[in-house]
């Protein structure tokens, strides 16, 4: 099973920490966040991953190599300019050549989401993409119909934006930054350059593709996108521990690159 870890961001809201290290190597519970995410993915059955690189990417690459890919095969997708979530995924498309559904995971997210159950849910639904979502405060919400299909979005203080007309009983849910995709999505990515993957999902949902919801409550979810949020996650790690900090095993990964 394969995965992509999205780690190219500059982490501007984490400055001054990210003046010296990339966001992917900011530590939580004494462990770089990239290692936490990789451990979670490996525990869910992932044996091969690609990580995209931009800001201080050489430091991320050196760390992954020094850790022998955390016991998995690994690859790098280097971005001269930031391509955002959708553009970064599209650039790495060649890595996903086995025809099997794969994970995409933001590097700045720590969670207790049942990743194996998310993957099963995706396969059972026959979806093009399945998003881990939950009820939580967020300035941007995705709207899902009563069957769990993406049908629109809503920004704080604004009216819903539907992909194909209003839907009764639609529920606003926040995206966790964790998803499973079928490789057929690459043929449907008409966007070019830098673009967010959520925009692609909304367009495809409007074209009749199943972009589904996986309800992740009541599992823990936190992200380190700002200094305040980082401190909250660190307090959780110190007081209760965090999923994925241990138990990912040992082994050597194979090295390869995507340019």
Image (spheres, grey):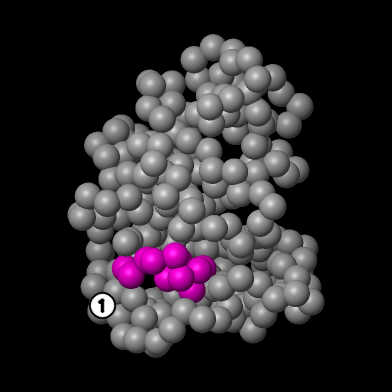
Name the residue located 73 percent from the left edge and 62 percent from the top edge. Answer: 229
Q: Return the x and y of residue 101 as percentages of the image width and height.
A: 32, 50
Image quadrant in which you'd find residue 167: top right
Quarter of the image containing the N terminus? bottom left
Name the residue located 54 percent from the left edge and 58 percent from the top edge. Answer: 114
Q: Return the x and y of residue 215 as percentages of the image width and height.
A: 59, 43
Q: Is residue 99 visible?
A: yes
Name the residue located 60 percent from the left edge and 74 percent from the top edge. Answer: 26
Outermost residue toward the top in this view: 165
Q: For label 1, count other residues whose C-alpha is less than 10 Å away and answer few (under 14), some (14-19) or many (20+).
A: some
Depicted 64 relative to depicted 142: above or below = below
Depicted 1 relative to depicted 179: above or below = below
Depicted 147 relative to depicted 1: above or below = above
Task: Identify residue for label 1.
Answer: 255
Q: Nearer the viewer, residue 76 or 118?
A: 118
Name the residue located 39 percent from the left edge and 66 percent from the top edge. Answer: 45
Q: Nearer the viewer, residue 9 or 4?
A: 4
Quarter of the image containing the C terminus? bottom left
Magenta stretch: includes residue 168: no
Image quadrant in which you'd find residue 109: bottom right
Q: Secondary structure at mark 1?
A: loop
Q: How many marks?
A: 1
Q: Is residue 186 left or right of residue 31?
A: left
Depicted 249 relative to depicted 188: above or below = below
Q: Is residue 82 left or right of residue 176?
A: left
Q: Nearer the viewer, residue 90 or 210?
A: 210
Magenta stretch: includes residue 45: yes
Query: What is the span of residues highlighted in magenta in the rendered image?
Result: 37-48
């Amino acid at each position: 099973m394969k995965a992509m870890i999205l780690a190219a961001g500059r982490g501007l809201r984490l400055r001054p920490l990210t003046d010296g290290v990339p966001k992917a190597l900011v530590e939580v519970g004494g462990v770089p966040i990239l290692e936490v995410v990789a451990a979670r993915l490996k525990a869910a059955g992932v044996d091969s991953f690609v990580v995209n690189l931009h800001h201080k990417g050489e430091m991320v690459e050196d760390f992954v190599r020094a850790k022998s890919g955390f016991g998995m095969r690994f690859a790098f997708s280097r971005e001269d300019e930031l391509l955002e979530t959708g553009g970064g995924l599209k650039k790495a498309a060649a890595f996903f050549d086995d025809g099997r559904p794969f994970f995409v995971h933001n590097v700045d997210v720590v969670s207790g989401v049942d990743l194996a159950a998310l993957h099963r849910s995706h396969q059972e639904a026959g979806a093009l993409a399945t998003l881990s979502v939950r009820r939580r405060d967020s300035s941007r919400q995705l709207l899902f119909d009563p069957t769990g299909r993406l049908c629109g979005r809503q920004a704080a203080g604004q009216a819903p934006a539907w992909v194909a007309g209003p839907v009764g009983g639609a529920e606003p849910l926040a995206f966790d930054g964790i998803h499973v995709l079928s490789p057929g999505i690459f043929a449907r990515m008409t966007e070019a350059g830098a673009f967010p993957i959520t925009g692609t999902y909304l367009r495809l949902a409007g074209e009749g593709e199943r972009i589904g919801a996986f309800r992740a409550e009541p599992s823990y979810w936190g992200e380190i996108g700002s200094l305040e949020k980082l401190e909250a996650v660190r307090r959780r790690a110190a007081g209760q521990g965090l999923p994925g900090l241990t138990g990912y095993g040992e082994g050597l990964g194979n090295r390869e690159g995507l340019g």
